[in-house]
Image (spheres, rainbow, N blue to C red):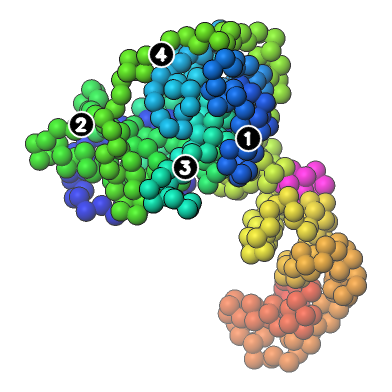
Amino acid sequence: MTKFATESAMNHELLAKYEPVIGLEVHAQLLTRTKIFCSCSTQFGDLPNSNVCPVCLGLPGTLPVLNKRVVELGIRASLALNCAVHEHSRFARKNYFYPDLPKGYQISQFELPLATGGWVEIDHDDKFKRIGITRLHLEEDAGKSLHDGFTHSAEKTYVDFNRCGTPLSEIVSEPDMRTPDEAYAYLTTLRQILLYTGVSDCNMEEGSLRCDANVSVRLRGTRGFGTKVEVKNLNSFRYLAKALEYEIERHIGVIESGGRIVQETRLWNQAASKTEPMRSKEKAHDYRYFPEPDLLPVHVSNAWRGEIRASLPELPAAKRARFVSALAVTPYDAEVLTDTQSLADYFEAVVIAGAPGKAAANWMQTELLRRLNVSGKEISCSPVSPAALAGLVSLVESGKITGAVGKKVFATMFETGRSAADIVAAEGLGAQVSDAAIEQAAREVIERNPDNVAKFKSGNEGVFKFFVGQVMKATKGQANPQVINDTLRKLLS
Ligand SMILES: [Zn+2]
């Protein structure tokens, strides 16, 4: 897992005296084609105010109709996060005024959320830890205020209502994280699960995944919670870690100098590398929540929930465990190979096509991923298919070509899309040099180097490598190293 260098100015002893307590609230846009309460498109990047209708503009007299697919995706996420999905949940009105919220209230779930009581397991520094999930609820997004880029931006704010009514799931964690690294690992794990289940595209640049953090500190060894601050605007994994580090030190600094932390919402200012106060934190009663009168309660039958559970894919953690136990790869390999569903699928396809797990894992992590990375291609667009890679692996594993030749063949496969067998035959790389030819080459090398033969016979084992190198050179790197070894041992004994 990624670690961040602490750029801390605060001394280590002072930091160690306090324990941070961190919880995250993550908003993930659900991957539907249409909005949560109307049939407008959710397409990102369309012309401002082109995907709007009377319902999502909140015009008087309109009525919301719940999009079933939103509930389905919400249930899917909840089950993957080990939550209890409730038979009955309900939408409520959260009242507040904001220019990008034309109704004057947001429809969200409040006292009866879709699901509660889940967990995810994070792997941080090879230690596993469960992070509790308090709740997952459904809600609509607000529009977007645009502060620059338009003719009158200097004196006006523009509003784009396209995002109004886009479906969100809000996933609230327990305050179970104790370091910025753990928070980073939690968000990474959560994102991977949402991607595997196809619930969200989790695109942070487009705002499909947004994260707010609640953070406080307490004296290490104590059990009560300190005053918490909510930090918003954490629209990248890096900002999350940096903002938490900043905020933890700020809290300790205030407390140590005899001050008190004020409960408030702060914004991360990336340019200034610090958090800044935004507003004092509202309490729930400020929003005057009440049940949404225009929508029926949400009912999830056992049958529907069971159907969705049965359709869940194998999740990343289970896949990693299976790769290690059934396909004999290392835990590190498994972590790399399950990074995305398509990478894991590719790996399994190579194995199904006949390659041993460990060899397939090695070729993918060295040659394939490196070349994909350099050429900026996704695994789904790999010029080398899983079956073609398995073909190459089998030529190397069976000793028909050496590993070194295999790498050259792979480079040609990647550029041309041709099969390994094809390239080996066409370029005469073919394995191999026969055993007789190896023996011939070995005899010649021995004959030409009587001094080294004498050294070897007097017990200088190091000189053996010299002979192997010479025979390898004589056979242009195409001979099987094991056969060279055996032949030389035989001739030199
Ligand atoms: Zn609409």
Tell me the CA gap for discs 4 and 3.
28 Å
Q: Which mark is residue 289?
A: 4
According to the picture, the residue beneath numbered tag 2 turns out to be 262
According to the picture, the residue beneath numbered tag 3 turns out to be 158
Does any atom of ligand 1 lie closer than 8 Å to the CB of label 1? yes
Task: Answer yes or no: is residue 131 visible.
Answer: no
- Whichever of labels 1 and 4 marks the residue nearer the N terminus, that label is 1
Tell me the CA gap for discs 1 and 4.
28 Å
- The image position of residue 426, as x and y in percent, is 90, 72
- Whichever of labels 4 and 3 marks the residue nearer the N terminus, that label is 3
- The image position of residue 10, as x and y in percent, is 20, 50
Which amino acid lies under the numbered mark 3 shown in the image of this protein?
Tyr
* In this view, 165 is above or below 112: below
> Which of pointers 3 and 1 indicates the residue nearer the eye?
3
Tally the marks.
4
Confirm or deny contact between disc 4 and disc 3 (CB under 8 A): no
- Residue in the image at 64% along x and 77% along y: 465
- Whichever of labels 2 and 4 marks the residue nearer the N terminus, that label is 2
Task: Give the camera-side residue of 69 and 395.
Answer: 69
Stretch of the chain drawn in magenta: 346-355
Q: SS of the residue at dot 3? A: strand
According to the picture, the residue beneath numbered tag 1 turns out to be 51
Q: Residues within 10 Å of mark 1 (few under 14, many from 20)?
A: many
